[in-house]
Amino acid sequence: MSDVFADLEKRGLLHQSTDAQQLAGWLAGGARTVYVGFDPTADSLHVGSLLPLMTLRRFQRAGHRPIALVGGATGMIGDPSGKSQERNLLSEEMLQANLSGMEQQLRSFLDFDSGDSSALLVNNWEWMKEFSYLGFLRDVGKHFPVNAMLAKDSVKHRLERDDVGISYTEFSYMLLQAYDFVHLHQQYDCGLQFGGSDQWGNITAGIDLARRLCGAHLYGLTCPLLTKSDGSKMGKTESGTVWLSADRTSPYQFYQYWINVADDDVGRCLRFLTDLSLEEIVALDEVRQTRPEKRESQRKLAEALTQLVHGSEQLAVAQKATEFFFGAEIADMRDEQLSDVFADVPSQQVPAADLGGEGLGLIDALSTAGLVQSKGEARRVIKEGGAYINNRRCTDIAARLTSTDLASETMVVLRRGKKRYALLQFVDS
């Protein structure tokens, strides 16, 4: 058993806890069962989910048994914590699709075949579906004081707003999550719930309910929310949320997000989200202070998270794609990969037949791609060494593009000068 509590403290991952000293001793006393809940509002987890998920992974690596709970029942209600308005309710079909996508991702982070510390994946719909409305009010609701519910920040903030308020449905969410903790304790001897700092009210509600229902002494622990140094949420870009699903956020885009993390944020991300030792992270901190231009911390962060989320093969593709912008030759890629890498550059479709016979002249290709205004300008750019085919310089004004120049199934990447790129996609007419 390793001292996971001390490791969390050193990494800055402890925000709130019940009976901190007693909790640390309890964790050090043997293998314990710990759970984290995940809200199935989409068919993929996102960057914000990484922090609780990685912390659950730390507990398992320290010898404890993790439970990942997906909220098939609570997902039908919606957690009001941290929300300024009522959530849209999801249909059963949407919830099931979301649960299936999340389960696959959870299994890639946690070990479900490691003996006594094997992870468990549970869905609270399995036990909540057994309750009738009257049965739940009688067996659970009567043990829940309304004044305690009203005192929770997630409820108070909504009640203070005349324009929004809170529905009885969302007000009841706390009871459902609290009962989850009680059920997991009775069924799996779970003694600790972990979550983001916005979950503190729900966690302590579960602890109080367990005390009232069965006299159990349970523990709660929260971590800070994953935010940037300016206080804004991490995992958001101009194009939207950064997801863990490759279908929503490509491995290249995911890798690039972490490569571009600011110096002020990267040390925290390394501590919160990677398995790197604190000694390695401190060494990276020192390099960042003396030679920030190397961006060694960002590279390590991007490598660690991309490999964990997408695997070694997709990490290699993301690294290769990143090198394209430093002049590496572009070859052996797939169309969708090039589309991701060059999503922000001009793209034109050209008849695939143009690659046959003698091929498409480079002068015409540069003009079609919009990299030059005239054929005369194209000749001058080529002669001066400013024209590139898949990052290979070409100074021959008679050069022609053929199928051998395809960097992927249908695409050729043209470049003018150092930074002006364009895509030509050769399609059947």
Image (cartoon, rainbow, N blue to C red):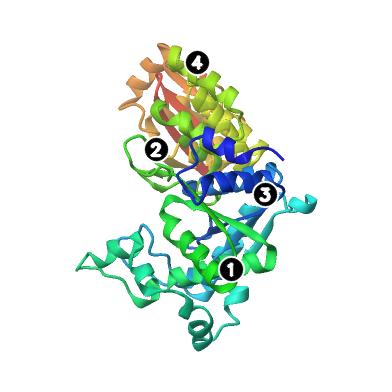
Q: Please, what is the three-letter code of the amino acid marked with disc 1?
A: Gly
Question: Which badge, 2 or 3, comes first in the chain's sequence?
Answer: 3
The spot of residue 19 in percent (x, y) is 52, 50
Badge 2: residue crowd in 10 Å (few <14, some 14–19, many ≥20) = few
In three-dimensional space, the C-alpha distance between marks 1 and 4, rounded to whole angstroms, equals: 52 Å
Name the residue: 55% across, 50% down: 245
Q: Is residue 346 left or right of residue 305?
A: left
The secondary element bearing badge 1 is classed as loop
In this rendering, does residue 33 appear at all? yes
Disc 3, SS: loop
Q: Which of disc 3 and disc 1 is earlier in sequence?
A: 3
| Residue designated by label 3 | 110
Query: CA–CA distance between discs 1 and 3?
Result: 31 Å
| Residue 429 seen | no
Question: Label 4 crowding class (10 Å Cα cut-off): few <14, some 14-19, many 20+?
Answer: some
Instruction: Please provide percent x and percent y for residue 364.
Output: 42, 29
Q: Earlier in the sequence, mark 3 or mark 4?
A: 3
Contact (CB < 8 A) between labels 1 and 4? no
Label 3 packing within 10 angstroms: few (<14), some (14-19), many (20+): many
Q: Residue at x 45, y 62 (%)?
A: 202
Residue type marked 2: Asp
Query: Which mark is drawn over residue 344?
Result: 2
* Whether residue 154 is situated above or below residue 143 in the rendered picture: above
**Residue at the disc numbered 1:** 215
Q: What is the distance, in whole Å, between disc 4 and disc 2 at their CAs?
A: 32 Å
The residue positioned farthest toward the bottom in the image shown: 134
* Disc 4 target residue: 287
Is 324 rendered above or below residue 64?
Answer: above
